[in-house]
Image (tube, rainbow, N blue to C red):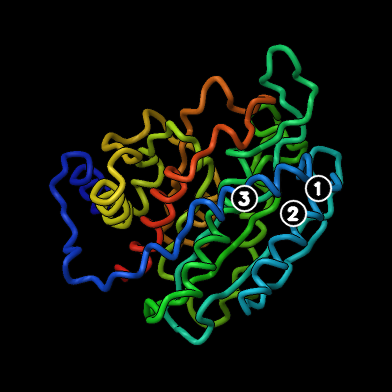
Amino acid sequence: MRRWAAAISFVLGLAAPALAQAPQPDVMQWQGKRALDDIVRLVGFGPRAMDAPGHRQAIDMIEAELRALGIASREQSWTSDVAGQTHAMTNIIAPIYPGETRRMILGTHYDSIVRAYRDQDHPDAPMPGANNSASGVALLLETARALHAQKTPPGIGVDLIFFDGEEGPISLGAGDRHWQPLGSPYFTAHLADTYPAAKPEQAVIFDMVCWREEKLYPEQASLLYAADQIDKFWNIGRTFAPGFFGTKPTPQPIFDDQIALNDDAHIPSFLVIGFQYEPYFNTTQDTPDKCSEAALDGVGRTVLRYIYAH
């Protein structure tokens, strides 16, 4: 009942976080230009779908960028057999401030759709995945850089999780009749490997966050699990980046990596996604020119403020 009450409170705008008391980071350390450069690099690898050469290149890039910041990441690897196909899969887990007992997850997927199945002219062409894949990776990497540059830590540990297989067993997202995320359910099934003592307090999942015209709305399914957290995040976003944050929830639930974290691991989790991305969604036109530094700064600096609000 409390979940529904909190969700209703959010929709009606009855809740307001006390931002004035929260410690504030140096948000200028979060730089959209660097994040956009990451997107360009990732797209340059071609498809990052399971079994594609760009898949391993993406892993290597993520780990190299984290290593440059002194962040020790680890690979969570396994073999997935779905719909008669076998895939070698890898989640990347990177703890920041590992000594902190209180922890939160920032997650995204790094795999991309293998072909632009929604493209009316070229449905079998590679899908670049600038927004739908690379943008979430860039957001997490730049958040790591910004945290590394802070003079004062936020007082909570941050675990970056780069999930594999979000686009499903044949890497076609909603175009795959067997579609289901693969990396996040594996992560939650083996949660004790990462959290042997206590689970993180919450998780935020990011997907499709770089479009220059995007508007982010609270995701409907997430409101049932993490309405208080959504309330805090969107109030920060509307305060400091109002052009990119809307008020009304999405008209329907969006199933992404937040579902396994909520349902299987019982970690309050919510999804930040710019799902309104027509006519480019999963076409050959999902390219870096659709992204903007302003959108990345708006979301990324909201993330940084949100971390410090804890």
Amino acid type at image mark 2? Ala
Residue at 61%, 71% in the rendered image: 94
25 vs 111: above or below: below
Badge 3 density bin: few <14, some 14–19, many ≥20, Cα 10 Å: few
204 vs 111: above or below: below
Q: Could you tell me if the residues under marks 1 and 2 are in contact, i.e. CB atoms within 8 Å?
A: yes
* Image quarter of the C terminus: bottom left
Residue 86 in percent (x, y) is at 86, 47
Among the two numbered marks 3 and 1 on one chain, the one whose residue lies closer to the N terminus: 3
Label number found at residue 37: 3
Among the two numbered marks 2 and 3 on one chain, the one whose residue lies closer to the N terminus: 3
Q: Nearer the viewer, residue 78 or 15?
A: 15
Q: Is residue 70 left or right of residue 150?
A: right
Residue at 67%, 58% in the rendered image: 186
* Residue ID for mark 2: 58
Q: Is residue 162 left or right of residue 258?
A: right
Q: What element does badge 3 sit on?
A: helix
Q: How much space separates mark 2 and mark 3, taking CA atoms?
A: 14 Å
Label number found at residue 54: 1
Amino acid type at image mark 1? Gly
